[in-house]
Image: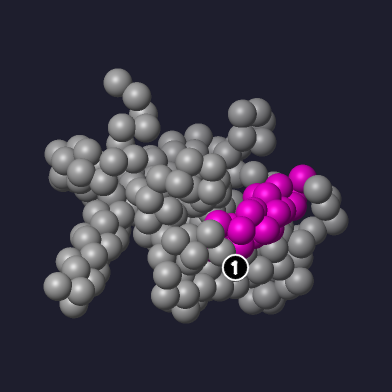
């Protein structure tokens, strides 16, 4: 079975209908487990106090914010190269989720940063890149809404996604590129020495998995909605021509 078979809207709708309830159920279970575990069953940090617990919202949302943009990039490239409509609609459906994750990351980062840095905002390279990424998300959504022809909109938003990927890379790796930034390094790393303590690391991983599953569930739901909307527009257009 080829992966490209799922580019067929009918096949995608059939498969997504079967797996969506399971993904949604797992998303609720893992997200609730990670957040409850993190916020209510972990100790205060010796230096940050209870403020550290915002990590269970901030890190997963920030990770998903950049990860979703990269998913949109792959879907956009598939559209540009192979012209599969499901990939374009999936990228479109992912954007509102991505902008929400980015907003959560910005707000929680400000709440976390105020007691740590003494300010709600600083023009740190990573924070600045994240703000620009947020604006790219808004521009992407606005461009889809502004262009009437769906194929033209998919082409233009795909190009915008390519450009915005530069800031997605910067927002994820700025702490590595610029050591002088205020933002701390990665909370999760392949190097266990750089990870947060296990008491925080374990619920953080569960929260991260939960946020990932939430994204997948919302992406499937959103793509299905976009496919239905495209079909409805086609039916209306045929009736007007008849």
Residue drawn at x 70%, y 54% is 166
- Judge left or right: residue 170 versus residue 224: right
Q: Residue furthest front?
A: 242
Q: Position of residue 93 (x, y in %)?
A: 37, 59
Q: Position of residue 137 (x, y in %)?
A: 53, 67
Residue drawn at x 34%, y 24% is 2
Residue 89 versus residue 24 in the image, above or below? below
Q: Residue furthest top?
A: 1
Q: Position of residue 34 (x, y in %)?
A: 35, 46
Is residue 39 shown to the viewer in this render? no
| Mark 1, residue position | 136
Between residues 48 and 14, which one lies in front from this camera angle? 14
Task: Determine the image quadrant of residue 81.
Answer: top right
Is residue 7 shown to the viewer in this render? yes
Q: Is residue 242 magenta?
A: no
Query: Which segment is the magenta one?
Result: 157-176
- Judge left or right: residue 93 versus residue 74: left
């Amino acid at each position: 079975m080829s992966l490209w078979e799922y580019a067929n809207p009918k096949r995608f709708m059939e498969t997504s209908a079967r797996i969506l309830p399971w993904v949604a159920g797992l998303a609720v279970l893992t997200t609730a487990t990670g957040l409850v575990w993190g916020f209510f069953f972990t100790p205060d940090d010796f230096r940050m106090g209870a403020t550290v617990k915002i990590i269970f919202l901030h890190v997963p949302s920030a990770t998903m914010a950049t990860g979703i943009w990269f998913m949109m990039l792959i879907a956009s490239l598939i559209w540009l190269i192979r012209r599969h409509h499901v990939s374009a609609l999936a990228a479109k459906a992912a954007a509102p989720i991505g902008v929400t994750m980015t907003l959560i990351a910005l707000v929680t980062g400000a709440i976390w940063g105020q007691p740590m840095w003494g300010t709600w905002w600083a023009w740190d390279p990573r924070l600045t890149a994240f703000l620009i990424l947020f604006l790219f998300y808004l521009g992407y959504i606005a461009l889809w809404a502004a262009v009437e022809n769906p194929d033209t909109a998919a082409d233009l938003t795909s190009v915008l996604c390519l450009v915005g990927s530069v800031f997605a890379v910067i927002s994820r790796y700025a702490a590595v590129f610029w050591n002088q930034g205020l933002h701390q390094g990665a909370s999760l790393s392949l190097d266990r020495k750089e990870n947060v303590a296990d008491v925080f690391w374990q619920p953080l991983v569960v929260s991260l998995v939960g946020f990932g599953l939430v994204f997948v569930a919302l992406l499937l739901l959103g793509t299905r909605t976009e496919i239905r909307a495209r079909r409805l527009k086609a039916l209306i257009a045929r009736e007007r021509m008849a």
